[in-house]
């Protein structure tokens, strides 16, 4: 495998202009359990499938709150996501303390992009092996961002990352015109849960493995786990 000559670090390009370690990090995302996000004009929702290693272990946390107007879900390496979420928390606190305003969602995306891209500019680091779906609500409305280890952060109307996420993406593309206009947050959550269901093969959604979060107009970042997800199953 000749590519091994070029994947020893994150700063060496292959002759075809590729950074193989970044591509490996993108592959790590595909091994994580699926998470789905979508947004309308006033609300943004994320749903995630939680996994446990075996019957004796707890389910892995998939959704992390960063501020009362901002949160994220992850697919990939959870420790990397924890590092990035802690960084976002610090930036939210800094913005509130210094400027007396909430950190805008677009700015949060730019900060994450810069932090991820630094790892492809110097030796001794590695790309973050995690993809994030970030939802938030600020003065410009509801936002959904998709973060990638390469440093790309895209604003999207709907997205899904993780194992077998293509089924959810196809479903969201099919119903996009409908959910963008939805004004009822409950209906938006149901649409997102249905999209997540489209990605499942052998598993079924239960109160144990489903996690939901919503943020939007008059709704701070709110997370539903365990018995609270029952109405949406």
Image (cartoon, rainbow, N blue to C red):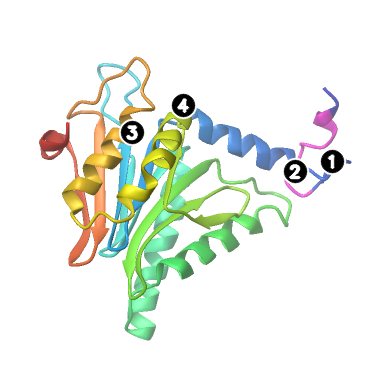
Q: CA distance from mark 4 to mark 2?
A: 24 Å
Q: Give percent across and percent down for residue 157.
A: 42, 53
Is residue 76 something that shows in the picture? yes
Name the residue at 39% across, 27% down: 199
From the viewer's perspective, is the residue at label 1 or at label 4 nearer? 4
Region rendered in magenta = 3-11
Q: Which mark is residue 19?
A: 2
Query: Disc 2 on helix, strand or loop?
Result: loop
Q: CA distance from mark 4 to mark 3?
A: 10 Å
Quadrant (top left, top right, bottom left, bottom right) of the N terminus: top right
Label 4: few (<14), some or many (≥20) within 10 Å? some
Residue at image mark 3:
196
How many numbered marks does the figure carry?
A: 4
Residue at image mark 1:
14
> Would you say the residues marked 2 and 3 are in contact, meaning their CB atoms lie under 8 Å apart?
no
User: In the displayed structure, does residue 67 sit left or right of residue 30?
Assistant: left
Q: Give percent across and percent down for residue 229.
A: 15, 37
Residue at image mark 4:
164
């Amino acid at each position: 495998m000749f590519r091994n000559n070029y994947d020893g670090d994150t700063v060496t390009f292959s002759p075809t202009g590729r950074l193989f370690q970044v591509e490996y990090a993108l592959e790590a995302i595909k091994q994580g359990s699926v998470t789905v996000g979508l947004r309308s004009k006033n609300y943004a929702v994320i749903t995630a499938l939680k996994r446990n290693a075996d019957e004796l272990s707890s389910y892995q946390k998939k959704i992390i709150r960063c501020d009362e107007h901002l949160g994220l879900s992850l697919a990939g390496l959870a420790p990397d996501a924890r590092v990035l979420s802690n960084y976002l928390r610090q930036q939210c606190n800094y913005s509130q303390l210094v400027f007396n305003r909430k950190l805008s969602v677009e700015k949060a995306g730019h900060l994450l992009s810069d932090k991820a891209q630094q790892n492809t500019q110097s030796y001794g680091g590695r790309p973050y092996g995690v993809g994030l779906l970030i939802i938030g609500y600020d003065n410009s409305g509801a936002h959904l961002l998709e973060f990638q280890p390469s440093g790309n952060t895209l604003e999207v109307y709907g997205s899904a990352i993780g194992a077998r996420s293509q089924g959810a993406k196809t479903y969201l593309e099919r119903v996009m015109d409908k959910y963008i206009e939805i004004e009822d947050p409950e209906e938006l959550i149901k649409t997102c849960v249905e999209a997540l269901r489209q990605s499942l093969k052998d598993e079924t959604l239960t109160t144990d493995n489903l996690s939901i979060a919503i943020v939007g107009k008059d709704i701070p970042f709110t997370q539903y786990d365990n018995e609270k997800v029952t109405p949406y199953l």
